[in-house]
Image (cartoon, grey):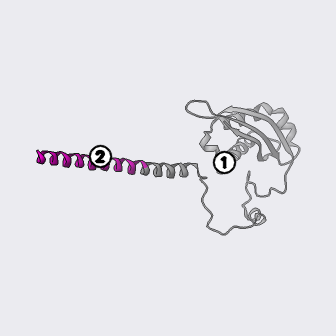
Amino acid sequence: MAEEEKKEKEQNEEKKKGGNLVLIIIVVLLVLMLVIGGIVAFLLLSDDEEPQAQPQQSQAQQIKNRPAATGSYSDDLEVGPMYPVEEFTVNLLSENGRRYLKAEINLEMESGELQAELDTKLPVVRDVIISVLTSKTVEEISTRKGKQKLKEQIVEQLNMRLEDGRVKRVYFMKFVIQ
């Protein structure tokens, strides 16, 4: 009988050791999953701009060093005449259609002569802006780089339809994603 009790105790101890081993493996796997999830979340939520390898320059130097191109923001100190466009509320491109954007936009014109054409073509201007905005997903316009690309697309699309002048830049006065 004593031998049977010893065998039972040994079996119970082996079961406890096996149970502890399973518990340790589960805890390690959970911690590993949390670490991987944190890394993935950090990568997805971080800005997709490349880190600068150069030392930080002053803001004035950065403005001077930017390339001048159509629709670029190379000289923010010299702002041309503005043309305000009423607020837009549009659905963004998504699987469930429940995300929307509220944006108020000002268009910077090369000269004041363009205002008359913009006044007469306001429905076309609004349609172009709505078309560009609704073609974007939340992920595309959530970053600074994405907003910059969106501005450039709006400028490009508007300038294709204008005759009396050009839109230089687009400024967002409001930009709310919900």
Q: Amino acid at mark 1?
A: Lys
Q: Residue at x 65, y 35 (%)?
A: 134
Which residue lies under the disc numbered 2? 19
Q: Residue at x 34, y 47 (%)?
A: 23
Secondary structure beneath label 2: helix
Secondary structure beneath label 1: helix
C-alpha distance separating marks 2 and 1: 56 Å
Residue 162 visible in the shown view:
no
Mark 2 nearby-residue class (10 Å; few <14, some 14–19, many ≥20): few
Quadrant where the C terminus sits is top right
Q: In this rendered view, identify the residue nearer to me: 133 or 97.
A: 97
Taking 135 as reference, is 63 left or right?
A: right
Q: Amino acid at mark 2?
A: Gly
Residue 138 visible in the shown view:
yes
| Above or below for 112 versus 57 | above
Label annotation for residue 149: 1
Taking 34 as reference, is 115 left or right?
A: right
**Magenta region's main secondary structure?**
helix
The region drawn magenta spans 1-30
Q: Residue furthest bottom?
A: 55
Q: In this rendered view, identify the residue nearer to me: 30 or 155.
A: 30
Q: Residue at x 62, y 40 (%)?
A: 138
* Residue 74 coordinates in the image, percent (x, y): 76, 58
| Above or below for 110 versus 136 | below
Quadrant where the N terminus sits is top left
Which is nearer the N-term, disc 2 or disc 1?
2
